[in-house]
Image: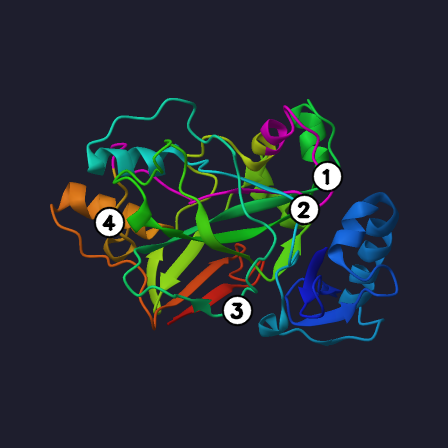
Amino acid sequence: MKLASLKHGRDGRLVVVSRDLTRATDAFIVVPTLQRALDEWERHAPALSALAEQLEHGSVPSFRFHEHDCAAPLPRAYARRHAAAWPGYAALLRQAAGAEAPAGEAGTLRDAASDGFLGPRDPLAVDDPAASLDLSAGLAAITGDLLRGADTVAAEDAVRLVTLVAEVIRHDRLRPDGLDLDGAEAPAIAASLAPVVVTPDELGDAWRDGSLHRPLLVSRNGKALGCPDAGTDLGRGLVALVAEAARHRALGAGTIVSAGPVSNRGIDGGPGRPAAEGGAGYACLAEARAAEALTGGWVRTPYLATGDRLRIEMKDPGGHSIFGAIEHDVAG
């Protein structure tokens, strides 16, 4: 099934969305918010699934679904852990900066802000026009309750929903290799989720080996930045990251485990080619800039600026949007 939260109060109004994202029906007869549904998933999920089937058959009242009306599926979440799960991203930034790899394992999880996600179509306000703002696009899993020390089987069972995530990172406050002074991954100054969250069974064959295997479409001002495949060159999948997040502490229902940016290497293991040249391109501006520096000697891709429009989406093999689109206009 597919779920979304319309803008309403602090926690949104839960709706069930049709598979083609054209219609929705209120879920209040079952549960009013997504967090409440996650808190008692075993109780509410069967009723929500039945409502989804009734929506597909046109046997319940419905209305036109507009992504612009959506808040983040979880406008505020109790916890979020984030990792750079595609090792090519960090390696490329370090190579372009001439930096050594920091101590510790690539893809280490860090705590990330989750108390105020942007809506998927909200403007992105920039209060400092001189800031070097970067886009990072990836995947996110939303979990149910998971005990400390759970294995990957239990972790996969705990993945309730999957969606897309976008983060905005300020690179002018970081080392040249994209890491902060402690060697950790860059913290985000803003984050957003796709309008729709999807149960893994709805993803079919695209959900396998503990992660999602589809190209992530990222564009800027209508021009493709990249379409890297989320299942290629992956260090650790979403399920493995969920298990890692629970290694030392239990996860509460509604925990978000996110990963990005999606990053595909070139055939020779080096930088991938730009989308304009027929390559997979990039899901991150800093990676595009690093690839340009390494292959051409000069950087052409600017960081975000007022007036830019960003769009992030993933489509099924038939060309239909799976989660709807994250689309932000950069405003001063």
**Chain-order first, disc 1 or disc 4:** 1
User: What is the span of residues highlighted in magenta in the rendered image?
Assistant: 242-270
Task: Where is residue 10? Give x, y as percent.
Answer: 69, 64
Q: Are marks 2 and 1 in contact (CB under 8 Å)?
A: yes
Please say whether residue 248 is visible from this viewpoint. Answer: yes
Residue receiving disc 3: 121
Callout 2 crowding tier (Cα within 10 Å): few <14, some 14–19, many ≥20: some
Residue receiving disc 1: 252
Mark 1 vs mark 4, foreground winner is 1
Q: Is residue 214 left or right of residue 177?
A: right
Callout 2 amino acid: Tyr
Task: Where is residue 26? Give x, y as percent.
Answer: 79, 69
Q: Which mark is residue 78?
A: 2
Mark 3 vs mark 2, foreground winner is 2
Callout 1 crowding tier (Cα within 10 Å): few <14, some 14–19, many ≥20: some
Q: Is residue 241 above or below residue 161?
A: above
Measured in 3D between alpha carbons, the distance from the residue under mark 4 to the one under mark 2, in whole angstroms, is 34 Å
Task: Where is residue 193? Give x, y as percent.
Answer: 56, 56
- Secondary element at tag 3: loop
**Chain-order first, disc 4 or disc 2:** 2
